Image: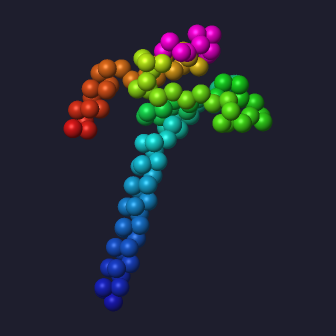
Amino acid sequence: MMDGTRAILITFSIAFELLGICFTIYAILSSAWQTANLDNSLHEHGLWLDCIVQNKNRNFNFSESTRCYYKFDFERNYGNFDPEYLATAEVGRHRFFRWQKSVIILLVK
């Protein structure tokens, strides 16, 4: 009797552990860590990626009106941003700074 209960508990433990690993991987790769619903824009800020939907209305297509920027590529792509575009200023506030990159490198090593 004890072996059957133990096997069931181990099975549930492994299933929950795998589920937790899947959620962790999704959270790291997702841009939806922090979502801000503004009047006519939607901002999703993640660890690596920021996505902004500028002209959000009731019937918008998320894939057509979305601009996504990698935080590591901000300095390289800064000249390509439209200064009149509201999301450019928002992207500038959420880029990786050198000290943040250094901390991540030290934590990973």
Residue 43: x and y in percent read 58, 29
Q: Which of the colour schemes (rainbow, by chain, secondary structure, one colour) is used?
A: rainbow
Question: Which residue is pictured at 38% across the width and 78% down the height?
Answer: 8
Asked whether residue 5 appears in the rendered view, the answer is: yes
Q: Residue at x 31, y 26 (%)?
A: 101
**Quadrant hosting residue 13:** bottom left
Residue 29 relative to residue 109: left or right: right
Q: Is residue 83 above or below residue 32?
A: above
Front one among 62 and 38: 62
Q: Residue at x 41, y 67 (%)?
A: 15
Q: Where does residue 66 sit, x and y in percent of width and height?
A: 63, 30
Q: Is residue 16 above or below residue 56?
A: below
**Range of magenta residues:** 78-86
Q: In the picture shown, does residue 53 fall above or below 29?
A: above
**Quadrant (top left/top right/bottom left/bottom right) for the N terminus:** bottom left
Give the image location of residue 48, x and y in percent.
43, 33
Q: Residue furthest bottom?
A: 1
- Closer-to-camera residue (17/92): 92
Question: Residue 64: within the magenta?
Answer: no
Q: Quadrant of residue 76?
A: top left
Location of residue 65 with respect to 14 vertically, above or below: above
Q: Is residue 42 visible?
A: no
**On the picture, is 37 further left or further right than 2?**
right
| Residue closer to the observer: 20 or 71 | 71
Give the residue at the far right of this rendering. 59
* Occupied quadrant, residue 28: top left
Q: Which residue corresponds to the image point at 26% horizontal and 32% vertical from the top-left?
A: 105
